Image: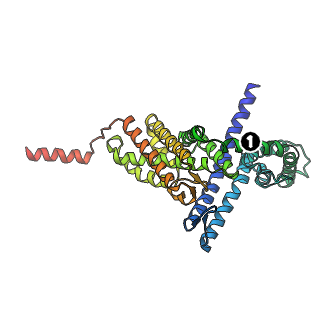
Amino acid sequence: MSENIKVIKDDLVKAFSTGVSYMMPVVVVGGICLALSLVGGEPVVGKGMVVTNPFLLNLGAIGSAGLGMMIPVLAAYISYSIAGKPGLTPGFITGFMASTPLGADHVVTGFLGAMLLGILSGYVAKWIKTWKVGKALMPVMPIMIIPIASTCIVGMLYLYVLIGPIGFAMKWLVSMLSNMQGSSGVILGLILGAMAAFDMGGPVNKTATAFTLALMAEGIYGPNGAYRIACAIPPLGIALSTFISQRKWAEDERRMGTSAAFMGLIGITEGAIPFAVKNLKTVLPSIIIGSAVGAGLAMIHGVESMVPHGGLIAIAGVNKAPMWYVIDMAIGVIVTAICLHILRPNITEPVKKSSAKKSITSDMNKA
């Protein structure tokens, strides 16, 4: 029994990780296009950034389309991880249902609904795959029977049973997080910041991503602002350290600092991975502390980001406290660099053969 539970647990962890992994490129395209479209906008009180340029409006339309796809893609690939290709169709359709206002109360269950519907779609499709049918029906099983049956079963279950409880849970979660102010808001920021840096794009980071995206879908943008600051801090903090603490890094690591800085500016946390792999015990605590500090400060200063992407490239999407967005990110970067300077010992690089040869030749000439 315990082994079965462990297998199911492992399957669910894999499914969530797969769903978020496939969703992330969609989010990145949508977020960056939307952020770039806002660059040419003008701030209007009560409306945020208003864009009037036709080209930027079209770019924003592309971004909005990408963001509109992220919930169906999440549900579809959670289902795909469980059932394979037969899980895609019910996952896409029921995921779209989760992101669409339905019922008399126009309930949107968002990410919570998409994750649950993705799981159900996967297991129902997997179950239908085991049906024993005649040879005449075998060819149409993957293209007709499995998609139609699984979609109808999960869709009806959602509409008649699940939509109410999930909608209530979402409203409760949104209400609770909306009221997080002061010290509780700082704690939330510290947790999100630490999660962003903990595995640098892994399952913990993706969990925080899904959480902030779910809140964005409900109109809560503060945690997203804090989290997007935190995502940029690890590669930027390491890049700063390679510049100001050169005795702490090998020559090849110092060269990688430039690429890490670029990745940090466009909000890609994975830029810190090559450095962490070489020395996890000094890099990981430093980036966790720096990201937590930056995100915690963002919650104090009320930073809100309207786009699901981080780094300075997304600053146009910050509708509240854009200056604090930059300052809090910079503070987190500096804290990371300070921690690295304290934790990392100085290194002694081996003398290059060419340099050694020149030194021997010089000594012989002197002799």
Instruction: Provide residue 100's location: percent of width, then percent of height.
Output: 78, 55
Tell me where residue 177 appears, x and y as whole percent: 66, 42
Comparing 285 with 88, the one in front is 285
Q: Extreme bottom residue here?
A: 54
In-image side of 101 versus 34 (left or right): right
Residue at the image point whose x is 86% and y is 55% from the top: 144
Q: Quadrant of residue 59?
A: bottom right
Q: Secondary structure at mark 1?
A: helix
Residue at image position (35%, 48%) is: 243
Quadrant where the N terminus lies? top right
Amino acid type at circle 1 is Trp
Q: Nearer the viewer, residue 345 or 348?
A: 345
Q: Which residue is mark 1?
A: 172
Q: Residues within 10 Å of mark 1 (few under 14, many from 20)?
A: few
Task: Residue 278: give x, y in percent of width and height.
Answer: 44, 39
- Give the total number of marks visible in the rendering: 1
The answer to whether residue 263 is seen in the rendering is no
Residue plotted at (73% across, 47% down): 80
Q: Position of residue 356 (x, y in %)?
A: 22, 44
Instruction: Kindly tell me whether residue 161 is visible in this rendering.
Output: yes
Question: What is the image's colouring?
Answer: rainbow
